[in-house]
Image (cartoon, rainbow, N blue to C red):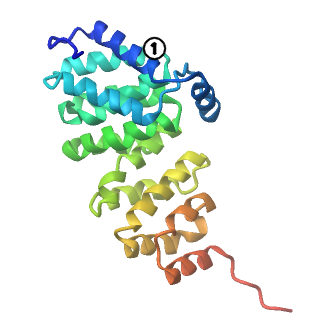
Amino acid sequence: MPYDPVVDVAKLVEQIDGELRSLGSPERAEHERAYLKSELEHYGASVPAIRGVAKKVLSRHPALAHDELVALVGALWMSPVHERRMLTSELLALDVDVLEPADVGLVEDLLRDSGTWALVDGLAASVMGPLTERCAELGSVLDRWAADADFWIRRSALLALLVPLRSGGGDFERFSRYAEQMLDDKEVFVRKAIGWVLRDTAKKRPDLVYRWLLPRAPRISSITIREAVKPLSVPQRAAVLAARRPPRLPAM
């Protein structure tokens, strides 16, 4: 049955919660909680199922206004339930054109409260990314994020640039600045993010990534380099990996 055309946020949240619960299983919930080392409650619904609920919500409310979307997101996120929080990310990603530059504060609050790549990555790449592409003034926010003490926020600064770089466009110069200052970062999730963005960029522009990697190879962690070189040609990959090894000393 379709939802009422006039949005009652409290009622809608209750209906959504019921749908998410019905799509879960205790076995999957326990597995995901252990896999993500999560302290949240888990219903055990799959990502495709959660995405399906998000699409249904927006199809039933095609004229969902900005303030209603923000209220819905806030109400869903308030409960420490993984599926509800993942649904907020999906809703924001699907309806990202409704967001305004001032909503960057909301996105940042959600990122800081996420505590897991399973929530951070979608918010960064599919919400903050398009918002930044549309509102160039938000580049200064990414600059601040890139130096933040919270490694999830640093990761988000990188992943916000991912989608356009993957498609062959994007701001590689900005990514280069961020990655350069994070090459010595001790956090594995930051190192993985650098490698991820480089790998996906290299699928369309391998020469660009090769030229970036080669002079920095001795500084780049193995976690980063392992992903970054995957799309490169065999000679390029060999050159980058050789540049990471110290030169052999002559035999005495």
Q: Residue 157: percent from the left, percent from the top?
A: 40, 45
Left/right placement of residue 1 relative to residue 197 reads left
Image quarter of residue 40: top right
Residue closest to the far right:
252
Q: Residue 78: percent from the left, percent from the top?
A: 42, 14
Q: Looking at the picture, does residue 166 appear above or below residue 160?
A: below
Point out the image quarter for the N terminus. top left
**At 38% across and 40% down in the image, what residue appears?**
124
Residue matched to label 1: 79
Q: Looking at the picture, does residue 142 appear above or below residue 20?
A: below
Q: Residue 136: percent from the left, percent from the top?
A: 21, 45
Can I make out residue 115 in this image?
A: yes
Point out the image quarter for the C terminus. bottom right
Q: Nearer the viewer, residue 177 or 163?
A: 163
Q: Looking at the picture, does residue 148 appear above or below residue 201?
A: above
**At 43% across and 31% down in the image, what residue appears?**
111
Secondary structure under tag 1 reads: loop
**At 40% across and 67% down in the image, what residue appears?**
202
Image quarter of residue 212: bottom left
Residue closest to the far front:
1
Left/right placement of residue 62 relative to residue 194 reads left
Label 1: few (<14), some or many (≥20) within 10 Å?
Answer: few
Can I make out residue 149 in this image?
A: no
Q: Residue 186: percent from the left, percent from the top?
A: 62, 48
Q: Nearer the viewer, residue 185 or 116?
A: 116
| Count of all numbered marks drawn on residues in the image | 1
- Identified by mark 1, the residue type is Ser
**At 43% across and 45% down in the image, what residue appears?**
146
